[in-house]
Image (tube, rainbow, N blue to C red):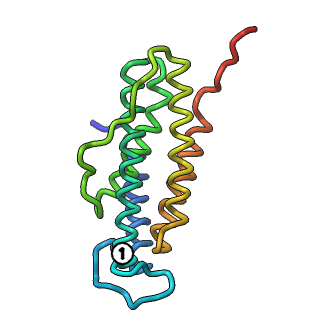
């Protein structure tokens, strides 16, 4: 039986999905190809804005899934970090679910790389990779052709920054 916090988390994800779907619909962005728009100065010849945005969604999903893999494996190897990393795992899972509706699964499934054998370096690696993900999502938002997709990617970038700020502080080694 779900606990109160589980039902609140489900409500947040559902509410977020509803808001994003509404933004996409209101902006006329279904991320499904509805034909080639008339040529403009910002249209790439032979590729519609929708096609270009779908490429961005694929890039975002690959980056999210790599980070999700690293966060999950770090949590499994360093059980003491699991409480701090679980919100990031949940965040990336929710973000991927939003993007997955319009993008096929990356093949092969991306992996996040090697987990450091000690907790402190493992957490530092997660922090660095999350910062890189935040920057990548922000850059993808800047390249998006659709306003709703740009806002979605920018909000994902901001959410990553907020979660990283809540990670345990890095302790300095005594000299």
Whether 113 is drawn above or below 53: the answer is above
Residue 83: percent from left, percent from top: 47, 26
Q: Residue 93: which quarter of the image?
A: top left
The image quadrant where one finds the N terminus is top left
The image quadrant where one finds the C terminus is top right
84 vs 76, left or right, is: right
Number of marks = 1
- The residue lying at 32 percent from left, 85 percent from top is 36
- Give SS at disc 1: helix
- The residue lying at 56 percent from left, 35 percent from top is 128
- The residue lying at 40 percent from left, 46 percent from top is 64
34 vs 158, left or right, is: left
> In the image as oriented, which residue stretches furthest toward the front?
45
Q: Residue 55: which quarter of the image?
A: bottom left
| Residue nearest the viewer, comparing 117 with 18 | 117
Residue 76: percent from left, percent from top: 36, 22
- The residue lying at 43 percent from left, 18 percent from top is 78
Q: Which residue is mark 1?
A: 50
| Residue nearest the viewer, comparing 99 with 110 | 110
| Residue nearest the viewer, comparing 18 with 93 | 93
Residue 21: percent from left, percent from top: 38, 68
155 vs 102, left or right, is: right
160 vs 34, left or right, is: right
Residue 115: percent from left, percent from top: 42, 24
């Amino acid at each position: 039986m779900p606990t109160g916090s589980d039902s609140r988390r489900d409500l947040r994800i559902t509410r977020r999905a509803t808001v994003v779907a509404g933004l996409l619909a209101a902006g006329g962005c279904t991320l499904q190809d509805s034909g080639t728009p008339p040529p403009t100065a910002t249209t790439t010849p032979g590729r519609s804005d929708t096609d270009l945005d779908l490429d961005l969604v694929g890039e975002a999903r690959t980056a999210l899934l790599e980070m999700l893999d690293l966060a999950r494996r770090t949590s499994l190897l360093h059980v003491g970090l699991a409480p701090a990393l679980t919100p990031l795992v949940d965040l990336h899972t929710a973000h991927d679910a939003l993007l997955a509706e319009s993008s096929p699964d990356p093949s092969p499934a991306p992996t996040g790389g090697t987990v450091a054998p000690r907790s402190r370096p493992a957490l530092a690696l997660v922090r660095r990779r999350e910062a890189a993900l935040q920057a990548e999502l922000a850059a993808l938002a800047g390249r998006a052709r659709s306003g709703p997709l740009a806002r979605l990617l920018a909000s994902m970038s901001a959410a990553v920054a907020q979660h990283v700020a809540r990670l345990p502080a890095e302790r300095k080694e005594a000299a």
